[in-house]
Amino acid sequence: MHNPSTFDAPRPAAARSSWLRYASPALFYPLAGRMIPFFAAGAALLAAAGLYTGLVVAPIDSQQGEVYRILFIHVAAAWMSMFLYLVMAGYAALGLIFNTRLSFMMMRALAPTGALFTFLTLWTGALWGKPTWGTWWVWDARLTSELILLFLYLGFMALQAATDDTQRADRGGAILLLAGVVNVPIIYFSVQWWSTLHQGASINLTSAPSMARVMVTAMLLMVAAFWLYSAAVALARVRGIIAEREPGAVLSGAVLAAGSPDGAVSSGERRGTRPEAP
């Protein structure tokens, strides 16, 4: 007859086979370190394939000539600028509702990359606009709303840096992100709601693409490359945030990861005692 207190005790939370346990910064820190090389390598390979397809394989456009090739960077950057903002807003909502520390950390880690892609969108748009529109900038609905998105990213990062109270900065930044979500559908639908110089979407879910298949392939390769790059950089940055905010979690994560294949540690290790010899 077995002892229920020994054999029927619930398994520790760190040993449960559930992804939810990685919401702990201590467990997420080593996992992020293992994932970064794969995301970075995938981003480099897809970017090389996308640039080769877009710059070499894709044909010359009959109306715009060679200058249209900037769209392979411009469109991918524009999509990522909006996507990353929505991801940050999602983390902000999780942090406010469930008070998860890692959600606030991921929210902060994604901000510089989102700002980078937003700036890249505006810069490549200006380079594209000069030969096609005859001007570097117009106060077009699409361009103006994208510029507002850049200000939202910069405002969020400024708010994070304005105080040493991380909890206050996290909650204030989360509220700012959620308030700014309304700008994302404005960016996307601006070409449909207003008369603008900016062309409409070349790819949508309701109709076939208006571009050649090789162009669509190059564009999607660049989108995937930018997505993997964002993941790699955000994971590297969140490891730094974890180390800065919770240095004990870095050591705890190393101990938990080394304790067993699934990241668990024995009850004796948690108590600081050695298991008895048989």
Image (spheres, rainbow, N blue to C red):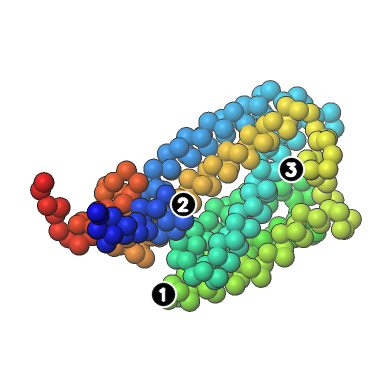
The percent position of residue 250, horizontal first and vertical second, equals 31, 57
Q: Residue at x 78, y 40 (%)?
A: 203
Q: Is residue 34 visible?
A: yes
Which residue reaches farthest left? 277
Q: CA distance from mark 1 to mark 2?
A: 31 Å
Residue 21, which numbered label?
none
Q: Label 2: which residue?
A: 19
**What SS does tag 2 mark?**
helix
Nearest the viewer among 129 and 264 is: 264
- Horizontal side, residue 94 vs residue 146: left or right: left
Q: Amino acid at mark 2?
A: Trp
- Quadrant of the rendered image containing residue 202: top right
Q: Amino acid at mark 3?
A: Trp
List the residue tagged with mark 1. Answer: 164
Q: Identify the residue at horizontal 67%, vertical 36% (top origin).
A: 220
Question: Vertically, is 180 above or below 189?
Answer: below
Which quadrant does the N terminus fall into?
bottom left
Q: Are marks 1 and 3 in contact (CB under 8 Å)?
A: no
| In front of the other: 135 or 88 | 88
Q: Could you give the CA–CA distance between mark 2 and mark 3, rounded to whole angstroms?
A: 43 Å
**Image check: 11 left or right of 108?**
left
Residue 106 image point, x, y percent: 49, 58
Can you give x and y, in whole percent of width and height, for residue 140 in the image? 81, 57
Placement of 276 over or under 172, stated as above or below:
above
The image quarter in which residue 68 lies: top right
Task: Identify the residue at horizontal 58%, vertical 42% (top origin).
Answer: 226
Q: Earlier in the sequence, mark 1 or mark 3?
A: 3
The crowd level at tag 2 (other Cα within 10 Å; few <14, some 14-19, many 20+) is few
- The residue wearing badge 3 is 128
Instruction: Say whether residue 34 is left or right of residue 76.
Output: left
Local packing at callout 1 (Cα closer than 10 Å; few below 14, some 14-19, many 20+) is: few
Residue lying at the far right of the rendered structure: 195
